[in-house]
Amino acid sequence: MIINHPLLGPRDSQEFVYLGDASLIDRPDWQAENAVDQFHEYLYQRTNPAGEHQELWFHEQGDRSWLVVTRNTLTHEITAVELARDVARRRGRSK
Amino acid sequence: MAEHRLKPITPLGGDTSRKDTFQGVTITEVVDTALASLSARASQAAEFRAAAPKFFGFDLPAPARSASGGDYTAIWTGPEQWFIEAPFATHEDIARIVKQGFGDAASVTEQTDGWGRFDLEGPRVRKVFEILSNLDLEKLPSGGASRTVIEHLGCILVCREAGARYSVYGPRSSAASLHHALVTAAKAAL
């Protein structure tokens, strides 16, 4: 499988490490009233879609950037690759 | 000041740098380069951008590229992060020198003895790398640079001159394994 890195171009997927669902970016506020419930959701609840899935990949043997890869779990077709940093900032995170 | 009678050794453990010659390729252990890592601090991006050309005399390279000027070569290693090379004889304390040029706009760490550098030169050098790395060297132009895996080791490959001269940085603690891989590949390919 080839991942089209936004900075470096097409790279073999063996250079990358897979983490999981990109919803891990949305870490809940630990000071919220219902923080325990939110963290339970955040840590344990995963959807397992047959189709388009956003996931976090780490370019361990490359530039060590975190990526958000949009991949179809049925066909393995990759439709988008973005720096996780950019995705997080777009969602209002500061770092 | 205390007098130290310490004897420096090369990454391969020798007194002098090792050189292996094959038909069409030489592999040289390079020990005269000082190395530092330079990272931009996110809070001072504008200051960092201004300081870089002022200190180096050239703009820091884009992703997957290196740039040279004067004593310095900068190698892109990741987003907002570069490795800086300079001659060891004049820049033994390279981290301090670079830090002075950037102040609070950058984080600088000493890397010199964390890495071992091998230079591969010669007209048939690409043949050797075809065995070693999945990086497409045909597409790596002069000045190109990338991290890649060689012999299960995370290495940094710098193309000094396309098709003719390349540098490999690997972890110093595994320099002998890396050297073994380079020599074995050269024997097999040439």
Image (spheres, rainbow, N blue to C red):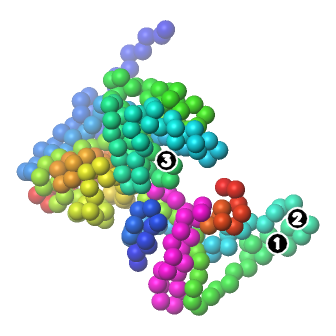
Q: Which of B133 and B101 is in front in this view?
A: B101
Q: Could you say whether the residue bearing mark 1 is in a helix, strand or loop?
A: helix
* Image vertical order of residue B8 relative to residue A41, above or below: above
Residue type of the residue flagged with mark 3:
Gln
Estimate how packed mark 1 is, as few (under 14), some (14 to 19) or many (20 or more) residues with alpha carbons within 10 Å.
some
Mark 1 and mark 2 residues within 8 Å of each other at the beta carbon: yes
Give residue A46's quadrant in the image.
bottom right
Can you give x and y, in whole percent of width and height, for residue A24 in the image?
68, 69
Q: Which chain carries label 1?
A: A
Measure the alpha-carbon separation of dots 1 and 2: 9 Å
Can you give x and y, in whole percent of width and height, for residue B74 in the image?
39, 41
Inspect this view and state whether residue B42 appears.
yes
| Residue for badge 1 | A38
Residue type of the residue flagged with mark 1:
Gln
Q: Residue at x 74, y 66 (%)?
A: A27
Inspect this view and state whether residue B112 appears.
no
Measure the alpha-carbon separation of dots 3 and 1: 35 Å
Can you give x and y, in whole percent of width and height, for residue A91 in the image?
69, 67
* Image vertical order of residue B4 relative to residue B88, above or below: above
Estimate how packed mark 2 is, as few (under 14), some (14 to 19) or many (20 or more) residues with alpha carbons within 10 Å.
few
Q: Which residue is drawn at 44% across and 73% down?
A: A3
Measure the alpha-carbon separation of dots 2 and 3: 35 Å
A79 magenta-colored:
yes
* Image vertical order of residue B100 relative to residue B74, above or below: above
Magenta highlight range = A63-86
Q: Could you say whether the residue bearing mark 3 is in a helix, strand or loop?
A: strand
Q: Which chain carries label 3?
A: B
| Residue for badge 3 | B81
Can you give x and y, in whole percent of width and height, for residue B12 in the image?
30, 39
| Residue for badge 2 | A32
Q: Which residue is drawn at 27% across and 33% down?
A: B14
